[in-house]
Image (cartoon, rainbow, N blue to C red):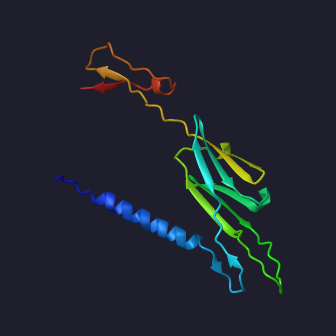
Amino acid sequence: MALIRWEPVAELNTIQNEMNRLFNNFFDQPAQNGRGNGTTRRWLPAMDLVEIADHYVLRADLPGLSDEDVTIQLEDNVLTISGERKTEHRDQQEGYYRLERAFGSFTRSLTLPDGVDPDSVQARFDRGVLEIRIPKPEQKKPKTVQISVGTHPDTKTIESDEPQANTRDPVAVA
């Protein structure tokens, strides 16, 4: 008989994944709109996020929209894409019709790493695909500190590439 270690956190993750799947399926199902066979569907555009050497690339499929229909905002490291695809439904009194395409407002948000420069974010809209390029923030470089050993006049100094770091007085180490 083999002993298996119980990991409660893994169990909670499994439950959370199942609940997310349940709610996603529930809200993505077509619903009767009260007028015959017509259905409405919640629309949430598909997005891809790819990390490459010096930036992130976000692509969103927005068929049927133009650049005027989409708003992009970056506030407090949260990138938000929102817009609306309007219905092309015409009221028909006779005959059968079925609508499967989804319409309506959407909002998608993505939290970016700290230090992203909002002025360097670029967006391009081409043939129904929105592409946003987000440069990665610069990595913080470690600062160096000058070290003085005891009261001897010969001090050991660690130098920095930053000009301001080398102008400070040495720090005495007891």
Count of labels in the image: 0
Above or below, 137 relative to 148: below
Q: Residue furthest left?
A: 1
Q: Nearer the viewer, residue 81 or 65?
A: 65
User: What percent of the width, then of the height, locates residue 117?
Assistant: 61, 44
Which residue is painted at 67% across and 45% down in the image?
Answer: 119
Q: Is residue 127 above or below residue 18?
A: above
Residue at position x 59%, y 35% from top? 54
- Give how far across and how far down residue 74 sits, in percent: 63, 54
- In percent of width and height, residue 166 lies at 46, 23
Q: Position of residue 116 (x, y in %)?
A: 58, 44
Which image quarter: residue 142? top left
168 left or right, relative to 100:
left
Q: Which quarter of the rendering shows the C terminus?
A: top left
Which residue is at 72% across, 80% downward? 38
Taking the image as shown, residue 173 lies to the left or right of residue 63, namely left
Examine the rendered structure and indicate whether residue 120 appears above or below residue 174.
below
- Give above or below for 126 relative to 81: above
Q: Quadrant of residue 65?
A: bottom right
Viewer-nearest residue: 152 or 89: 89
| Depth check, front residue: 29 or 75 | 29
